[in-house]
Each structure stands twice: as C-alpha cells, then as structure tokens.
Image (spheres, rainbow, N blue to C red):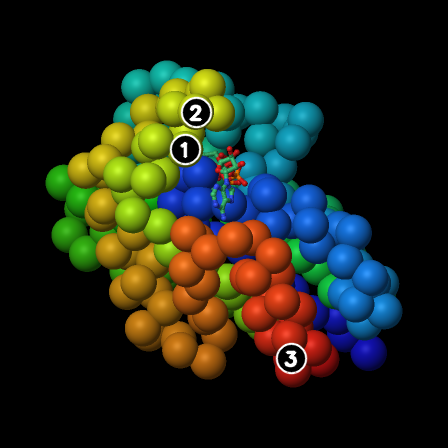
Amino acid sequence: MLGKLITFEGIDGSGKSTMLALLRENAGLKQLGDIAFTREPTQNTLTGKAVYAAIESDVDPMAELFLFMADHAAHVAETVRPNIAAGKIMISDRYSDSRCAYQGATLEKVIPNALDFVKNLHEGWTVVPDLTFVFDLAPEDSVERCKNRGEKTKFEKIEFLTHVRENFMTLAQAEPNRFVILNAKLPPEDNEKIIVEKIKALL
Ligand SMILES: Nc1ncnc2c1ncn2[C@@H]1O[C@H](COP(=O)(O)OP(=O)(O)OP(=O)(O)O)[C@@H](O)[C@H]1O
Ligand SMILES: Cc1cn([C@H]2C[C@H](O)[C@@H](COP(=O)(O)O)O2)c(=O)[nH]c1=O
C-alpha cells in the first residue's frame, strides 16, 4: 500500500521545527506506522546548498525560484517517491506550498499572478501532500521570535511575511480538505494533540 505525505508550512519562526521535534518523540504517532521525517530546502545536497547560497544573496528572484524548484525535483525523486512507494508516512518540514507562498511574494512585481504561476509549475509531476498543516502567526510575532533565535534572513521582514502569510491563506482556501490552519501562538503541546488526531483521521 502507498504511504502518505504530510507537510508542515508557515512563515519563518512559526514553530514548525519545534513541533517536529515533539512529534519525533510522540508515542501515539509512532504506533501509526513507519514514519520518515524530511524537509525542504534539503540539507547537505547539491541543490539544497545552492538554495541556501541563494537565500543569503540578492540573486534574481526568478533564478531563485528555479533553484528551489530544482531542489524540490531532487527531493521528490530521491526521497519522497521512494518512501511513499515503500508505504511510509512522510512528514516534511516545508514543501511545495512554501514555494507558492514565498516565491509567489518575491515574484509579485516580476510576473502577473505570481502565486498561480508558481503553483502551476508543480502540476503533473510532483507528489501532492495528503494533509498540510499551516502554523499561522502574525508577522510581528514571527520577526520577534526570529530575532530571539539570533538569525536573520532576507525573508524575515514584516511586510514581506505579511504577503507570504496571505498567500498561505489563499492556498488553504483553495483546498480546504487538504489544509489545517493552526494557531501558532498556542502552546506547542496543544497543537501537537490536534495534529496527531488529524493524522489518525487521515490514516
Ligand atoms: N508555540 C510557541 N509559542 C512560543 N514560542 C514558540 C512556539 N513554538 C516555537 N516557538 C519559538 O519560536 C522560535 C521559532 O520556532 P521554530 O524554529 O520551531 O520555527 P520554524 O517554523 O521551524 O522556523 P523556520 O521556518 O524559520 O526555520 C523558537 O525560538 C521557538 O522556541
Ligand atoms: C522550501 C522553501 C523555503 N523558502 C524559505 C523559507 C525560509 O525563509 C527559508 C529557509 O527555510 P528554513 O526552513 O528556515 O530552513 O527559505 C522559500 O522561500 N521557498 C521554498 O520553497
């Protein structure tokens, strides 16, 4: 039997990594099947390194989109498809919706309907997630959390993250059966319970 793909999305600092650390240890989740954790951008790969170099530069946003797309293609081919074929439950920290939301925003002034343009690039070849959680957080809180974390990327700006957040909401409204919006200000343990219940219902 084919596995499932579950993705975690949201603006920077919204709590995805914190939640995934909790889920790795969640006994109820472990009982549901063979779980494989993954992420985008991919780590320590040719394409992932190119993406992180781009994030730290002021590279042309269209060029940056295609670096993210290349990383996604490698991720799908080398990790996602084989694990799904092996019947695993794959949980990805960011996936295609991050591209639609972030590059939909970086390309706003470059191409009309940038979000749809990016979304359409994925059609026909990617693996579509079965379930997607969006950690919804005000950009002001996001920037504050990122400041406390001690990192700063070119994306961590209130105006830009406001646009990214709106894009996540647009994506969720278009596919209400796939998306679950979480209040990222709740204690992580509260959202953890909601997530495990939704995953149980999916399986
Ligand atoms: N529910 C929460 N309430 C308050 N603070 C939180 C919560 N979840 C996470 N944090 C804190 O916010 C910061 C960012 O969290 P985390 O690294 O999990 O976010 P992220 O979504 O993985 O970020 P990014 O996508 O930028 O890597 C961390 O300092 C973390 O401790
Ligand atoms: C997958 C993906 C990510 N981004 C952005 C989101 C973050 O600001 C950075 C790096 O991600 P991390 O989880 O903080 O390591 O990249 C993006 O713009 N487009 C994407 O497709």
Percent position of residue 112, x then y:
15, 52
Q: Is residue 90 above or below residue 179?
A: above
Q: Is residue 48 above or below residue 167?
A: above
* Mark 2 beta carbon near ligand 1 (under 8 Å): yes
Locate residue 25 relative to residue 148 in the image: left or right: right
Q: Residue at x 69, y 45 (%)?
A: 21
Task: Give the crowd class for mark 1: few <14, some 14-19, many >=20 residues within 10 Å.
Answer: some
Percent position of residue 25, x then y:
78, 51
Q: Which residue is mark 2?
A: 148
Q: Which residue is mark 1?
A: 145
Task: Give the crowd class for mark 3: few <14, some 14-19, many >=20 residues within 10 Å.
Answer: few
Q: How many marks?
A: 3
Q: Residue at x 63, y 27 (%)?
A: 46
Kindly identify the amino acid type of the residue bearing the numbered disc 3.
Leu
SS for dot 2: helix
* Mark 3 beta carbon near ligand 1 (under 8 Å): no
* Pointer 3 or 1: first along the chain: 1
* Pointer 3 or 2: first along the chain: 2
Kindly identify the amino acid type of the residue bearing the numbered disc 2.
Asn
**Which image quadrant is residue 182 in?**
bottom left
Percent position of residue 132, x then y:
52, 65
Q: Residue at x 48, y 25 (%)?
A: 149
Q: Which mark is residue 202?
A: 3
Q: Nearer the viewer, residue 51 or 172?
A: 172
Q: Residue at x 55, y 37 (%)?
A: 41
- In the rendered view of the protein, which quadrant contains the C terminus? bottom right
Q: Which mark is residue 131?
A: none
Marks 3/2: CA–CA distance: 35 Å
Q: Is residue 150 visible in this depiction of the protein?
A: yes
SS for dot 1: helix
* Mark 1 beta carbon near ligand 1 (under 8 Å): yes
Q: Nearer the viewer, residue 154 or 72?
A: 154
